[in-house]
Image (cartoon, coloured by chain):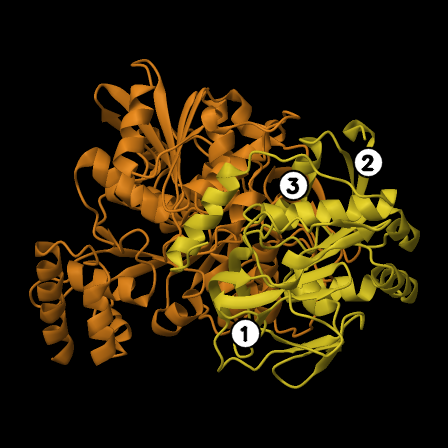
Amino acid sequence: MRKDNLYLTIGWLYPELMSTYGDRGNIICLQKRCEWRRIEVEIKRLDVGFDYRQLATCNLLFMGGAQDTQQKIVSRDFSKEKVKVLKEMIEEEIPGLYICGAYQFLGKYYKEANGKIINGLGILDLYSKNPGANHPRLIGNIAVEIHDLRFKIYENGGKNHKSYFINHKSTLVGFENHGGRTYLGKDIKPLGRVIKGFGNNGTDGTEGAVYKNSFGSYLHGPILPKNPHLADHLIKLALERKYKKIIDLSSLDDSLEWQAHEAIAKRLGISV
Amino acid sequence: MLNFILVILGKIISYVSQLVNLGYGSTWPGHVTLSINKNFIREIIKANPQLKIILIAGTNGKTTTGKLIQTILENSGKKVFQNEAGANLLNGISSSLIRYSNKVGKLNYDFAIFEVDENTLPLALKEITPNYLILLNLFRDQLDRYGEVNTIADKWKQALKKLSKSTTLILNADDPQIAYLGLQQNSKSLGSDSKQPRVLNRSYTSGFYFGLDDKTLHQTSHQHAVDSTYCPNCNSKLYYNSIYYSHLGDWECKNCGNKRPKNIFSNPPPSRLSGSYNLYNILAAVLVAKNIGVTNKLINDSLKTFTPAFGRQEILKVDGKKVQIFLSKNPTSFNESLRTIKSLGAKNVLFVLNDRIPDGRDVSWIWDIDTEEYIKNFNSVVLSGDRAYDMGLRLKYSYFSEFPISNFQFQIVGDLKKAISLSLNKTNKSETLYVLPTYSAMLEVRKILTGKKISI
């Protein structure tokens, strides 16, 4: 298959408001990794007031973290149609990456320290709460071990196809910084298990969440540059869903990415 | 009596820690004295009523502004002391009081200048009633320490509510959040207590504003890492007649009428400092100096000969070559450093990225720097520091080329001494090596280049 025929549309939700912690690096990473493989990319910036019909034109979604004020503005902008369309798309397995505030927002609710409940989009089976100023924020470098994704096999016309993670490391590294603690329901799996760090809530050892092809996580860094296997996993999922066939991504020289990845793992006392 | 003993104790601690080269000499004495007497700062200041105090707060520019003011005042014959650059928490302020007290615990100075960290300002205002309070700007910096710019603005607003009438506010009109603090302050002082003050452009007697008014400096669009482009009054998106840098400019809200104050001091005298961002520091310093009564001639002369603070465009001569250091500690200052060195024709650059406590442990912010815009022109790029690989990734993903590139376009050298040697080797005698370090990296680079350690 000729790679230069491939074309991907990435929907970047609220790039102006939800871009606080270097999260646009995830978009840059996805874009470059496609361009380097001669896969054309269009980044659709879906800002406040965007037409909900734009969502369906996207093959891959991304939403980053934000400060509280900005998150309130985003919440107001999510009309009934937008929520409905997004929920349907996620159920229909559109790949997506949701970081920190976005991750919380996709859940059922967020309970503030004073007990006030802020409704989430209700798409993912999880909720978050802030235990109050007496509890420290969960901050620091973090290493996560991924399980399920490593062994995900795709079936297509009877042919088994390996997950992108099989040939690569099964760790994710990043930096977390959140006051909110997230608790997963029974209809959703964690992204991984915390090796070092806090993760979703600092108690149950889980980090992030995966539901169908939606990935939520607290990892900044940003998450994708030092975890190129996750970046490529998302690109592959998006292309395969769009073109309805197995697509092998050509390998890139990721030695710098893995050196950066290992530098953090080493600092946390982990060998990868 | 107790405080007199604490001063002596503090001086001993400072001497000892310098002797054993611990490097924390400028905050330990203050730390110890405050833990013994938490009112130490308040009491020492009260015991020195002749001392006039200038507080400077803001994300970028405190040290340069402080040094500008000190230079101008000293040239006018005043005796001035400052807390050490970067030692801007309460323990740093306390340490400076100890250091500059004489043997009988008195401060023989006319002025004290304290640069204050964003989060510390409300605490500092509880202990100190400054004669002048300068609010420079608010940018995202050290996210893992403070989390949110809006939270800090709110804390400042609360602290300003209790501000004494004897404090003169010097405010950056071009920063919407800062200007808004002044407007709210004014409506408070005029007796109204509405949540959304109606904004009128009259001259503000409780404060003075500075800002830029030079169309030649106008930027065409915001850089990516921009905060505060939403109206602090009604949250609508702000419109800019001119953008000078980041979110600073001639702003207005077309929804509620909130806009940049009209009567602003916008005439920076010429100086050797480069970069738009330094114009703001100059304006702030000059405005304070004018208020104090320094003559224009003296101010202008001081600026002509002013040399920058360490690490902030400081020029060092090493092996017959010039090295210029531009402290780059958050997306805004990094972008400005890149913009400035590009305008200076930079060819050889050394980036040093650390993630220690003074730098901020989370380096995600480097992806908010617009490296794509600036790096094309550099010949030699060397990367060093704790997080050199992260910086490498940022640069790798900045290249316009369709194809992936290997490391040869920039070199990663973990050992800082070697990195500096390599960078200097690649720099010709007629060229300048530009160094863009984060805070702790800047101290290390200076130490290597000058052989002197700065105790911070």
In the picture, measured across the screen, residue B113 lies left or right of residue A30, that is left
Cα distance in 3D space between marks 2 and 3: 16 Å
Identify the residue at image location x=22%, y=58%.
B26
Write down which chain is painted yellow.
Answer: A
Image check: A107 left or right of B117? right
Left or right side of B455 for B114: right
Amino acid residing under circle 2: Tyr
Kindly identify which chain the residue marked by label 3 belongs to. Answer: A
Q: Earlier in the sequence, mark 3 or mark 1?
A: 3
Q: Work out whether residue A66 can be spotted.
A: yes
Q: Please state which of residues B456 and B372 is positioned toward the viewer in this rendering.
A: B372
Q: Colour of chain B?
A: orange
**Disc on res. B264:** none
Residue B280 visible? The answer is: no
The residue nearer to you, when weighing B52 against B341, is: B341
Callout 2: helix, strand or loop?
strand
Subunit bearing disc 1: A
Whether callout 3 and callout 1 share a subunit is answered yes
Where residue B120 sits, quadrant-wise, is bottom left
Amino acid type assigned to the residue bearing label 3 in the image: Ile
Name the residue carrying label 1. A205
Tag 2 residue: A7
Give residue B205's quadrant in the image.
bottom right
**Which is nearer the eye, B287 or B379?**
B379
Residue at the spot of label 3 = A28
Give the percent coordinates (x, y) of residue B428: 32, 14
> Label 2 vs label 1: CA separation?
38 Å
Could you tell me which quadrant the N terminus of chain A lies in? top right
Q: Is residue B231 above or below residue B366?
A: below
Foreground tag (2 vs 3): 2
Identify the amino acid type marked 1.
Gly
Whether the residues at callouts 2 and 3 have beta carbons within 8 Å, the answer is: no
